[in-house]
Image (tube, rainbow, N blue to C red):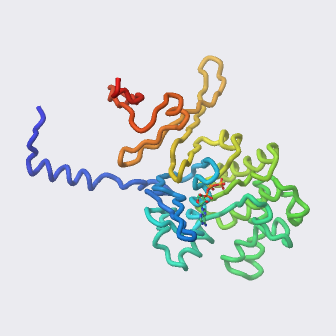
């Protein structure tokens, strides 16, 4: 029998249960909680992020996709510490991105985050060799002197080796292909062992074969070094290679595709199974994919029914 009038002890118990519940994103490396970014130009407001929720666990390799203008770059700039949110919360590896001081922000950009941009020319200094480009971030943070310089060069060469471009060590960017330059850029971004590697369209300027090699370098970094990696991409092939792809729509995370391998017990064949999920926010809001709602002509109001193991959503039938 259920009690409709809870005792004082029941209420106290409920209150402590609520307090003991882990906070949203407590075990995530990246937590975005109702993140808002509003740009105002000439008195016109653009809401680039409209309450975006995103959790990324340590060690994940994930892709962010979305139409042009959906807010991907805005989110990446915030995570990179280059821009500050208007409201909401954002934490990366224990750093609060809203309350960081200018000094903390500099240290955060140098030590916690690695960044790879789309334009190959933006990632590397043209007058340095590949090995020097990778060693540079270490020299900017670490101690100087002959011994540490040798250690930096050694680590730079190790990273070039790991990323499959050891032969480029003495070449300057213009002596390398676009794909090799991007792999050197990954090496430079990994130089200071960041907690998170962010990449905004890193294969955007490359043909599909080269893009594949660059993506393989991200995968190697993720598997060999355990670095958490978030890649913004338009490239369906890249999005299909990762276990988790999160789609952003109108400044919010809308759907998520998770892929897992399944091995057929009789044939031993491995197949990748993909399943699409929608994000349910803490207020219970859910964004249905446009192609689903459009195909059933759903708009404004829908009918809901709670079933034992799912919730059914029907087109509005109130005027029948
Ligand atoms: N600095 C800015 N000032 C004003 N508006 C901006 C600024 N940066 C972005 N926006 C606007 O915010 C919205 C989101 O832009 P954002 O660049 O984050 O989208 P995106 O998903 O990265 O697009 P794309 O795939 O084309 O790079 C757009 O409407 C854009 O015009």
Relative to 48, 119 lies left or right: right
Q: Residue at x 66, y 67 (%)?
A: 192
Image location (x, y in percent) of residue 86: 47, 67
Relative to 2, 291 lies left or right: right
- In this rendering, the answer to whether 318 lies above or below 60 is above
Q: Residue at x 58, y 74 (%)?
A: 107
Image location (x, y in percent) of residue 244: 58, 43
Q: Quadrant of residue 143?
A: bottom right
Q: Quadrant of residue 123?
A: bottom right
Considering every residue shown, the one lying at the far front of the view is 319
Between 77 and 267, the one lying in front of the other is: 77
- In this rendering, the answer to whether 281 lies above or below 290 is below
Image location (x, y in percent) of residue 82: 60, 69
Between 220 and 182, the one lying in front of the other is: 182
The quadrant in which the C terminus is found is top left
Q: Residue at x 44, y 57 (%)?
A: 34
Number of numbered callouts drawn:
0
Say if residue 154 shows up in the picture.
Answer: no
């Amino acid at each position: 029998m259920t009690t409709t009038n809870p005792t004082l002890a029941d209420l106290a118990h409920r209150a402590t249960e609520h307090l003991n519940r882990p906070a949203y994103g407590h075990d995530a490396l990246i937590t975005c909680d109702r993140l808002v970014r509003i740009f105002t130009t000439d008195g016109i407001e653009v809401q680039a992020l409209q309450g975006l929720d995103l959790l990324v666990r340590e060690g994940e390799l994930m892709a962010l996709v979305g139409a042009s203008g959906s807010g991907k770059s805005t989110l990446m700039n915030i995570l990179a510490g280059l821009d500050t949110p208007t409201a909401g919360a954002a934490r990366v590896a224990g750093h609060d991105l809203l309350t960081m001081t200018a000094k903390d922000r500099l240290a955060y950009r140098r030590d916690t985050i690695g960044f790879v941009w789309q334009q190959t020319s933006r990632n590397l200094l043209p007058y340095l060799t590949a090995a020097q480009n990778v060693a540079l971030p270490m020299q900017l943070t670490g101690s100087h002197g002959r011994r540490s310089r040798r250690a930096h060069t050694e680590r730079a060469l190790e990273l070039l080796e790991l990323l499959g471009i050891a032969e480029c060590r003495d070449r300057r960017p213009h002596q390398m292909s676009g794909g090799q330059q991007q792999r050197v850029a990954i090496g430079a971004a990994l130089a200071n062992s960041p907690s998170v590697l962010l990449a905004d369209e890193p294969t955007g300027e490359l043909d599909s074969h080269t893009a594949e090699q660059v993506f393989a370098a991200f995968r190697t970094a993720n598997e060999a070094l355990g670095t958490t990696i978030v890649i913004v991409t338009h490239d369906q092939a890249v999005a299909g290679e990762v276990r988790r792809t999160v789609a952003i729509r109108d400044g919010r995370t809308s759907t998520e595709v998770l892929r897992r391998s399944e091995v057929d017990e009789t044939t031993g064949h491995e197949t990748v199974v993909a399943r699409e999920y929608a994000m349910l926010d803490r207020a219970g809001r859910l964004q249905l994919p446009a192609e689903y709602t459009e195909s059933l002509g759903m708009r404004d109001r829908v009918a809901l029914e709670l079933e034992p193991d799912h919730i059914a959503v029907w087109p509005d039938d109130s005027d029948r």
